[in-house]
Amino acid sequence: MTSQVDLLSLQNLDRVAAVRHLSAHQQVLEAVMHDYPVLPVKFGTLLPDEDGLHELLRQGDRLFRTTLATYAGKQQLEVLVLWDLQQTFQAIANEEPIATLRAQIAGRPPEETVSERVTLGQLVHAELQHRRSLIGAQVIAQLRNVADDLIVNPTMDDRMVVNVALLIDDTRQGDLDDTLDALDVLFSGQFQIRCVGPLPPYSFATLDVQALPFTAVDAARQQLGLAEEISSAEIKRAYRQLATLAHPDLNPSAEHAVAQMEELTEAYQLLSALAKAQAPSASDEGQAWPCHLDRASVERTLLLSVVRQEDVS
């Protein structure tokens, strides 16, 4: 799904308009997901024009086909478990040694109990985390039995006990429903268990699109002493030759040699990534192919990868 958009108009949206746009986007996704797998694109990704979109589809053909085939017949669901925080704190207050410490503080002036109150807060926090950990382990163990994959997300606030993303086969939706019902019984209905979805596999497979700045690529090319048109094999050959000369064992200044090796390695990794992105879609990646490092070619080349949420820093 694509559309032409004015970036400034999006930046100036009020909350109501933003929610309306997001809702419309979600409705389109849900409609498409009935018949086709969906590969999400990293939020905020923009291409300069329609030619850029065509180039994205051309360069990513193999990656898109492989990824979409992997996630066909699967959907993401998010399971949240919430507890009543006030009831939880009341239960914790009756635990030892918290109950005894509370009794010792009660009725005394605040200025006389600063240290005890700090300790009390630390004990309550530790017990809260302990309970969350125990409950989370039980929930996650049960959900793993029905999910093809699972990612544990951070809890957003103290009310949230568990926050997980599940990758579920379409045929196992009933199994998930049964598991959630069993968890509700296990916890005697003390917690709210919510299931959000189905969603595209945002947490498990999101397309990341990067365009390399020409200045960085050109600096790396000069660092390795390469021409603007070379073969992919020449990048590795030039790096190995220069790395041999810069090896610390052959240089009197170890610090200079280490710094030079780091620069050469960064240049090699950058150009290798660009060369891989320029590989013909039908080529064997074990073979060499032409690599173009002129400005027009670099600015037209996109680095594409499919990332998991937990891999994103």
Image (cartoon, rainbow, N blue to C red):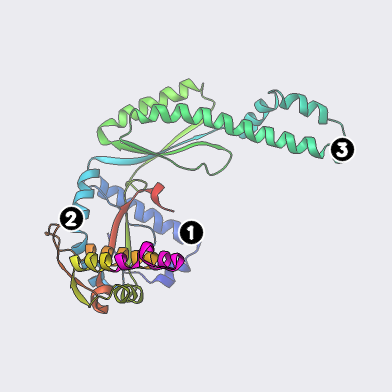
Instruction: Residue 209: give x, y in percent of width and height.
Output: 32, 62
Q: Is residue 129 above or below residue 306?
A: above
Q: Quadrant of the N terminus?
A: bottom left
Residue 112 image label: 3
Q: Amino acid at mark 2?
A: Arg
| Residue annotated with mark 1 | 16
Q: Residue at x 26, y 67 (%)?
A: 241
Q: Is residue 17 above or below residue 93?
A: below
- Report if residue 140 lies within the magenta region: no
Instruction: Residue 28: give x, y in percent of width and height.
Output: 30, 53
- The part of the chain drawn in magenta is 242-260
Q: Nearer the viewer, mark 1 or mark 3?
A: 3
Q: CA distance from mark 3 to mark 2?
A: 69 Å
Q: Are marks 1 and 3 in contact (CB under 8 Å)?
A: no
Residue 290 image label: none
Q: CA distance from mark 1 to mark 3?
A: 50 Å
Q: Amino acid at mark 1?
A: Val
Q: CA distance from mark 2 to mark 1?
A: 39 Å
Is residue 231 toward the left or the right of residue 33 in the image? Answer: left
| Residue annotated with mark 2 | 62
Residue 159 figure quarter: top right
Categorize mark 3 by other alpha carbons within 10 Å: few (<14), some (14-19), many (20+): few
